[in-house]
Amino acid sequence: MNIAFIGGGNMGEAILGALIQKNICPPQNITVSEIKAERRTYLETSYGIKTTASNPDAIKSAEVVLLAIKPQNLPELSAELKGKLADKQLVISIIAGATLSKLSGGLAHKAVVRVMPNTPAMIGMGMSVWTALPSVSPAQKDQAKAILSAMGKEIYTGKETMLDAATAISGSGPAYFFLFMEGLEKAALEMGFTPEEASILVSQTAAGSAIYAGKSGLALTQLRKNVTSPGGTTAEAIKAFEEAGLEATIIKAAKAAFNRSVELGKG
Ligand SMILES: NC(=O)C1=CN([C@@H]2O[C@H](COP(=O)(O)OP(=O)(O)OC[C@H]3O[C@@H](n4cnc5c(N)ncnc54)[C@H](OP(=O)(O)O)[C@@H]3O)[C@@H](O)[C@H]2O)C=CC1
Ligand SMILES: O=C(O)[C@@H]1CCC=N1
């Protein structure tokens, strides 16, 4: 499979890294079109892929064109590529808020898939939620699924509005967990651990908890209760979280991300 990436930033790198690592696409079949010269050099030397500063050049021999630019750069890109895509080329967009109708109208192209991935795709632990225009063929859907599976888990939805919800939960979600981890790491440092120790304690606890939650078959509330001995240490921490309104804050934050995704879609 030949893939052209438009935009070689955080997510572009995460996706191409996963495709190479899982042997879905050899580096020589990947072309990244990227504005920044230093990013092009970095991606070429790190992954052995081809790069260009020209979007029309990048898409020439691509079966799949993966749009990984920021939402504000989409109008300019659409104007540049409008009418230049062949019917058989599949466009996969990961741009937050960019609806199928906006993408399809802007590019004058019918084979469009919209995905909300996340950065853990970099290590094959990503979560992607995706949808497609009815004109995307079953073979193209299989192609999209193969790419997303290389990045981690994927869920297809026939309801495009679920992409805004996915943005709020799994797309932005890693940042919420990183924020929590940053706080815990600061606490560890204040308690006397070295930076290296604090980093290991926090990342191993986060990874262990997440994997255990997925594998145990127990509800999250039960897992939390299993850690919380009556009258013990965890109960004191949970009390402090509850007094600060942590759960309500998490829900409020996710809804703010959801609303922003909807807003981006209208722009
Ligand atoms: N980061 C994340 O966790 C996630 C991001 N997304 C979505 O992925 C998209 C990319 O995000 P992210 O990778 O973080 O963004 P980045 O800014 O890291 O990457 C985008 C890159 O594309 C370059 N670029 C801008 N315009 C063009 C153009 N016309 N042609 C070629 N290259 C261009 C940018 O350069 P410059 O900086 O100079 O503009 C930048 O280097 C966004 O739309 C975002 O909504 C989706 C899920 C998760
Ligand atoms: O913050 C953003 O807009 C993008 C979309 C999801 C994660 N990053």
Image: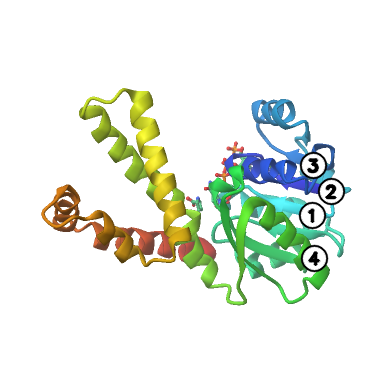
Residue 30's tag is 3
Q: Amino acid at mark 4?
A: Gln
Between the C-alphas of marks 1 and 2, the distance is 7 Å
Viewer-nearest residue: 168 or 187: 187
Q: Which residue is mark 4?
A: 140
How many numbered marks does the figure carry?
Answer: 4
Q: Which residue is mark 1?
A: 64
Marks 2 and 1: in contact by CB < 8 Å? yes
Marks 3 and 4: in contact by CB < 8 Å? no
Q: Which residue is mark 2?
A: 2
- Residue 7 visible in the picture: no
Mark 2 vs mark 3: which is more N-terminal? 2
- SS assignment at label 1: strand
Marks 3 and 2: in contact by CB < 8 Å? yes
Place of residue 3 in the rendered image (x, y in percent of width and height, measured from the top left): 79, 48
Mark 2 vs mark 4: which is more N-terminal? 2
Residue at point 44%, 66% (across, down): 217
Mark 4 vs mark 3: which is more N-terminal? 3
Place of residue 32 in the rendered image (x, y in percent of width and height, measured from the top left): 74, 40
- SS assignment at label 2: loop
Task: Answer with left or right where residue 162 lies relative to residue 101.
Answer: left
Q: Amino acid at mark 2?
A: Asn
Mark 1 vs mark 2: which is more N-terminal? 2
